[in-house]
Every structure is written in structure tokens, then in C-alpha cells.
Amino acid sequence: MAIIILLTRILPFLFFRKKHPSGVLNYLERNIPPLIMLLLVLYCLKDVRWTSAPYGLFEFGAIAVVIIVHLWKSNALLSIMSGTTAYMFMIKVLVST
């Protein structure tokens, strides 16, 4: 097991010895994180009941909070925590009243 872990640590350095990374690696480095975030958002929205009240309004409200806070502060942790807090507030306070 230790040899496998060692190989996974060493192989990237052996494959990418050049100082300049390839175009494919630059493309993946630039585009994979937003695609993963999009996939996570879609996964979170998969169980929303679009045909009955509240029609996903709380989910879209939380997404809006995340976008606004991230554009304002550019801090991923703060954005995620504020969106989670807003969603929990909406489903616990607004639904129970």
C-alpha cells in the first residue's frame, strides 16, 4: 500500500517535467472546478418538487444568496455557509409559520 501511495505522489512530477504545462492540462485546470460546482448544484436540485408549493423558491433563494455573497466577498467558505444558513432559515422559520 505504501508503494502505491508513493507512486501516486511521484508520477505527476515524472509526467510533467516540462516547465510549461500542456494545453490540455491548462484547459482542465481552468474548466473542471466550475463544472464540478455546476454538477453539485444540479445534484442538490434533483429532489425539488417543481409542481407543488413552494416550487423551489427556497432553493433558488439560497443559490441567490451564495452568488451574491461570493460576488461581494469572493470567499467560497463564506458563500457556502451563508447560503446554507439562508436555506435553513427559510425552511425552518418561513415554512413553520
Image: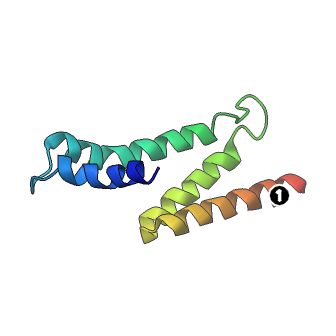
Q: Is residue 58 above or below residue 80?
A: above
Q: Is residue 49 above or below residue 44?
A: above
Q: Where is residue 41? Give x, y as percent.
A: 55, 43
Most foreground residue, 8 or 51? 8
Look at the image and name its color scheme: rainbow
User: Across the whole image, how many numbered discs are drawn on residues?
Assistant: 1
Crowd tier of the residue under label 1, counting other residues whose Cα lies within 10 Å: few below 14, some 14–19, many 20 or above: few
Q: Quadrant of the C terminus?
A: bottom right
> In percent of the image, x 64 and y 34: which residue is there?
46
Q: Quadrant of residue 24?
A: top left
Please, which residue is most extreme toward the right here? 97
User: Which residue position is annotated with label 1?
Assistant: 92
> In percent of the image, x 62 and y 42: which residue is there?
44
Most foreground residue, 80 or 1? 1
Most foreground residue, 77 or 93? 77
Where disc 1 sits, the SS reads helix
Q: Where is residue 23? Give x, y as percent.
A: 15, 42
In the drawing, does residue 76 fall left or right of residue 15? right
Amino acid type, residue under disc 1 in the picture: Lys
In the drawing, does residue 49 fall left or right of residue 13? right
> In percent of the image, x 47 and y 42: which residue is there?
38
Please, which residue is most extreme toward the top here? 51
In the drawing, does residue 15 fall left or right of residue 47? left
Q: Where is residue 88? Give x, y as percent.
A: 74, 59
Most foreground residue, 73 or 24? 24
> In percent of the image, x 66 and y 47: which residue is there?
59
Q: Quadrant of residue 84?
A: bottom right
Q: Where is residue 53? Give x, y as percent.
A: 79, 37
Q: Quadrant of residue 48?
A: top right
